[in-house]
């Protein structure tokens, strides 16, 4: 099972490390290895959230996620995206931007770093909306009940997530503008750039997430009908068929997953410059990491891990909220990538531990009462 799921990741790792040695020797090998580990640690929460969405999709769209999706993730976000940033920010053509990335690495790094505020604002707002919509939703299973219970009641207020996100964005842009003014008016237009990029992230979330939700809702009646057919088949002794979303709903879920992956990869791409400014080594290292994130996503789906460890999805969304906050903070201040990775791993690890405790409590209660007592979930 492990080899089948992670086989391609192992193969890409071997090829990537060999390519690194051929490109720049053992030093390049070490850089690519470090970048791979960095990407995996920063994106573990991405895999958990992806799995929660991917398990709803049918086999065809799961394969699309693993084929076309991985091409977008590895080549699009880890190789093409940084070049596009440079091309847009420096008003260069695509060929000129590639030439700059290969021949003038210091200037290339400088241009990508200058574009960081707009990247962080876009990704930060997209991820913040995901976290807010999750935390304001009233769920049957709650992890940190002392936080989630009151917030789920507040979530009944229409458009609360968008209002909070816009307030956060306004504060971030005003902070950038005020600091620019204090430093002699340099980069005063950065506040406007942050504001526009953040609004772009918010709009992207609303469009892609809204469309996928719309088509998913349209399938509810069909799913209810299929559930009835399943029950009839079960009573007749026929095997049940698994329900999975396809068609337009799955297509927009796929788009949502790709935008989500892009938002998660922003910090990895920017953080990679702390290790190297060589675009080839960055693409190799981050690409290997992205493959493992994809494989881990599929593993979580096939093993039913999210169903067994019910708080994992909560931990991943809290990690998303932390990442969104850190991205918005990095618009003005530098944050070490190790902090970002540690927070994500810590929150998911804590949610996993809570899930194990919950499962043991359920097993003990069922063993003591013949399975008739239900143990309260949450912390």
Image: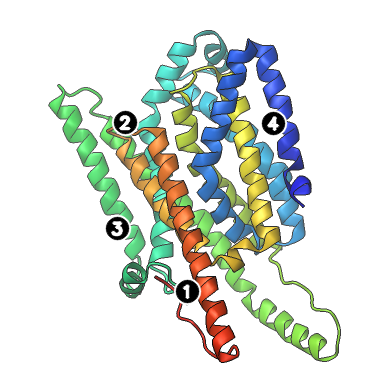
Badge 4 vs badge 1, beta-carbon distance below 8 Å: no
Which circle, 3 or 4, is nearer the viewer? 4
Q: Residues within 10 Å of mark 3 (few under 14, many from 20)?
A: some
Q: CA distance from mark 2 to mark 1?
A: 36 Å
* Location of mark 3 (residue): 164
| Residue highlighted by disc 4 | 13
Residue at the top extreme? 103
Q: Are marks 3 and 4 in contact (CB under 8 Å)?
A: no
x, y percent for residue 278: 54, 17
Secondary structure beneath dot 4 equals helix
Q: Is residue 189 left or right of residue 376?
A: left
Q: Residues within 10 Å of mark 2 (few under 14, many from 20)?
A: few
Which of the two marks, 2 or 4, is nearer to us in this view?
4
In the shown orientation, is residue 341 left or right of residue 180?
Answer: right
Indicate which disc residue 141 carries. Answer: 1
Alpha-carbon span between mark 3 and mark 4: 41 Å
The answer to whether the residues at label 2 and label 4 have Cβ atoms under 8 Å apart is: no
Q: Nearer the viewer, residue 273 or 218?
A: 273
Q: Residue at x 29, y 31 (%)?
A: 190
How many angstroms separate mark 4 from mark 1 (CA)?
38 Å
| Res 202 seen here | no
For the point 58% across and 72% down, the residue is 217
Q: Quadrant of residue 305?
A: bottom right
Instruction: Give the labeled residue for mark 2.
Output: 334
Considering only vertical position in the picture, is 309 above or below 338? below
Tell me how far mark 3 sits from mark 1, CA to CA: 24 Å
Q: Is residue 3 above or below residue 306?
A: above
Whichever of callouts 4 and 1 sits on the residue coming sooner in the sequence is 4
Residue at point 48% right, 60% down?
353
């Amino acid at each position: 099972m492990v080899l089948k799921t992670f086989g391609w990741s192992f193969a890409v790792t071997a090829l990537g490390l060999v390519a690194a040695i051929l490109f720049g020797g053992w030093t390049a090998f070490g850089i690519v290895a470090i970048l791979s580990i960095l990407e995996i640690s920063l994106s573990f929460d991405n895999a958990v959230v992806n799995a929660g969405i991917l398990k709803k999709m049918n086999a065809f769209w799961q394969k699309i996620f693993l084929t076309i999706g991985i091409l977008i993730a590895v080549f699009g976000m880890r190789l093409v995206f940084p070049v596009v940033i440079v091309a847009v920010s420096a008003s260069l053509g695509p060929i000129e931007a590639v030439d700059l990335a290969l021949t003038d690495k210091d200037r290339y790094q400088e241009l990508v770093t200058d574009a960081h505020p707009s990247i962080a604002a876009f990704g930060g707002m997209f991820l913040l909306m995901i976290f807010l919509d999750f935390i304001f939703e009233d769920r049957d299973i709650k992890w940190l009940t002392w936080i989630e219970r009151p917030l789920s009641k507040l979530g009944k207020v229409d458009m609360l997530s968008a209002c909070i996100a816009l307030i956060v964005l306004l504060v971030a842009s005003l902070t950038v503008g005020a600091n620019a003014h204090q430093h002699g008016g340099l980069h005063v237009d950065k506040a406007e750039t942050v504001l526009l990029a953040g609004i772009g992230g918010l709009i992207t979330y609303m469009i892609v997430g809204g469309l996928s939700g719309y088509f998913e809702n349209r399938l509810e009646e069909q799913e209810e009908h299929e559930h009835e057919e399943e029950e009839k088949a079960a009573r007749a002794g026929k095997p049940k068929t698994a329900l999975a979303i396809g068609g337009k709903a799955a297509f927009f879920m796929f788009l949502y997953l790709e935008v989500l992956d892009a938002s998660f990869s922003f910090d990895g791409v920017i953080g990679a410059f702390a290790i190297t400014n060589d675009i080839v080594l960055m693409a190799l290292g981050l690409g290997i990491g992205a493959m493992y994130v994809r494989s881990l996503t599929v593993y979580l789906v096939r093993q039913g891990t999210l169903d067994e460890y019910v708080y994992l999805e909560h931990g991943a969304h809290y990690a998303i909220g932390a990442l969104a906050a850190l991205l918005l903070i990095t618009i003005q201040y530098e944050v070490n990538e190790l902090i970002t990775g540690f927070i994500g791993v810590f929150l998911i690890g804590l949610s996993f531990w809570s899930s194990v405790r919950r499962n043991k409590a359920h097993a003990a209660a069922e063993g003591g009462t013949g399975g008739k007592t239900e143990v309260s979930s949450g912390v």
